[in-house]
Image (cartoon, rainbow, N blue to C red):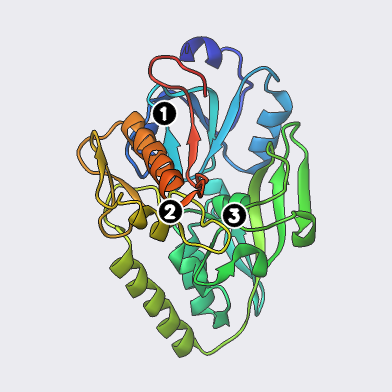
């Protein structure tokens, strides 16, 4: 990687470029090599301008707040796009509808809905990360998914074109969104229903308490590691395979919730990924089920291996 050479090839923007930016400072795991160049666009128009003018052979990678992300130790070649304050709008459309920018934390959307007496969005309190990430993976918790409350999403494609798309056109399923992989979500419109603030607040408190009791929320982790297989729960399979508390290097399967991997003792990304693959192998051996990663793994291995 050559950040300075790459900078010379990039279009002028109103946002900022950060060559050699440490991704360990961004990801919740606190691991990972550098981005060759990090780009933080000023707003949607700036992002669209960049995408319309950047050379097509330059690799682009989009990240949010790094909550469900493992960046490999060799870093990320090309440009890493991270949306910033220009994508933080949060406003009422009508008495039960909210427009949220892609970088608004899911928990903030839930609190905003509470303030305005809107129910059906409370489940967002239990989802780490931002609205953009929730759109990309149809995030869900406590029996609800984003598609249940999504009206439409706004995105910019690789050529800089802006799209506004209704939920029905996004082909959303369990932890899946059918939007083209090169689309960058910039905003969402969500609709709930009128509710009693006291009841909404009580439900939110229940979600908060349940999450803190069951998950290692104060550890360096990336959230749920594997998707639940059809008709089952990943954590139960991991537990039955005897993997609770198992370590690889500085990484450990959380003793509190074994579908969470934690950076306990200065783990590398390689430690975390190796531990995840060990978990998958043991679960396959003991149950025949092949777990699928829910955490997104990106970048190159430290020894220069392939993605």
In the depicted view, which residue is nearer to us: 31 or 92? 31
The residue drawn where x is 59% and y is 51% is 137
Dot placed on the residue nearer the N-terminal end, 3 or 2: 3
Other residues around mark 1 within 10 Å, as few (<14) / some (14–19) / many (≥20): many
27 sits left or right of 160 in the view: left
- The residue that label 2 is drawn on is 224
In the depicted view, which residue is nearer to us: 158 or 278? 278
| Residue 112 x, y percent position in the rendering | 51, 71
- Displayed quadrant of residue 10: top right
Dot placed on the residue nearer the N-terminal end, 3 or 1: 1
The residue drawn where x is 72% and y is 48% is 178
Q: Alpha carbon of mark 2 to alpha carbon of mark 1: how far?
A: 18 Å
In the depicted view, which residue is nearer to us: 143 or 107? 143
| Residue 176 x, y percent position in the rendering | 64, 52
Dot placed on the residue nearer the N-terminal end, 2 or 1: 1
- Displayed quadrant of residue 89: bottom right
- The residue that label 3 is drawn on is 175
| Residue 8 x, y percent position in the rendering | 57, 12
Mark 3 touches mark 2? (CB < 8 Å):
no
279 sits left or right of 174 in the view: left
- The residue that label 1 is drawn on is 72
The residue drawn where x is 48% and y is 36% is 297
- Displayed quadrant of residue 41: top right
């Amino acid at each position: 990687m050559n950040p300075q050479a790459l900078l010379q090839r990039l279009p002028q923007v109103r946002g900022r470029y950060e060559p050699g930016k440490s991704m360990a400072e961004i990801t919740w795991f606190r691991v990972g090599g550098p981005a060759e160049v990090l780009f933080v666009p000023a707003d949607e128009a700036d992002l669209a301008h960049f995408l319309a003018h950047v050379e097509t052979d330059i690799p682009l990678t989009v990240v949010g707040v790094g909550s469900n992300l493992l960046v490999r130790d060799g870093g990320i070649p090309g440009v890493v796009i991270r949306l910033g304050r220009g994508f933080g709008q949060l406003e009422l459309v009508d008495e039960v509808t909210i427009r949220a920018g892609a970088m608004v934390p899911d928990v903030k959307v839930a609190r905003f809905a509470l303030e305005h007496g809107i129910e059906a969005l409370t489940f967002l309190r239990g989802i780490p990360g931002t609205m953009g990430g929730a759109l990309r993976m149809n995030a869900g918790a406590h029996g609800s998914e984003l598609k249940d409350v999504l009206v439409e999403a706004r995105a910019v494609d690789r050529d800089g074109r802006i799209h506004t798309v209704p939920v029905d056109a996004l082909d959303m399923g369990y932890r899946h969104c059918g939007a083209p992989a090169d689309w960058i979500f910039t905003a969402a419109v969500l609709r709930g229903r009128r509710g009693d603030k006291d009841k909404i607040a009580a439900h939110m408190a229940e979600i908060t308490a349940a999450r803190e009791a069951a998950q290692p929320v104060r550890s360096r982790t990336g959230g749920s590691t594997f998707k639940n297989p059809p008709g089952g729960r990943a954590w139960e399979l991991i537990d039955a395979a005897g993997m609770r508390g198992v370590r690889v290097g500085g990484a450990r399967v959380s003793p509190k919730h074994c579908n969470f991997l934690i950076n306990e003792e200065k783990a590398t990304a390689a430690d975390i990924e190796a531990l995840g693959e060990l978990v998958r192998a043991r679960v396959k051996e003991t149950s025949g089920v092949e777990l699928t990663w829910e955490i997104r793994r990106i970048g190159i291995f430290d020894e220069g291996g392939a993605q």
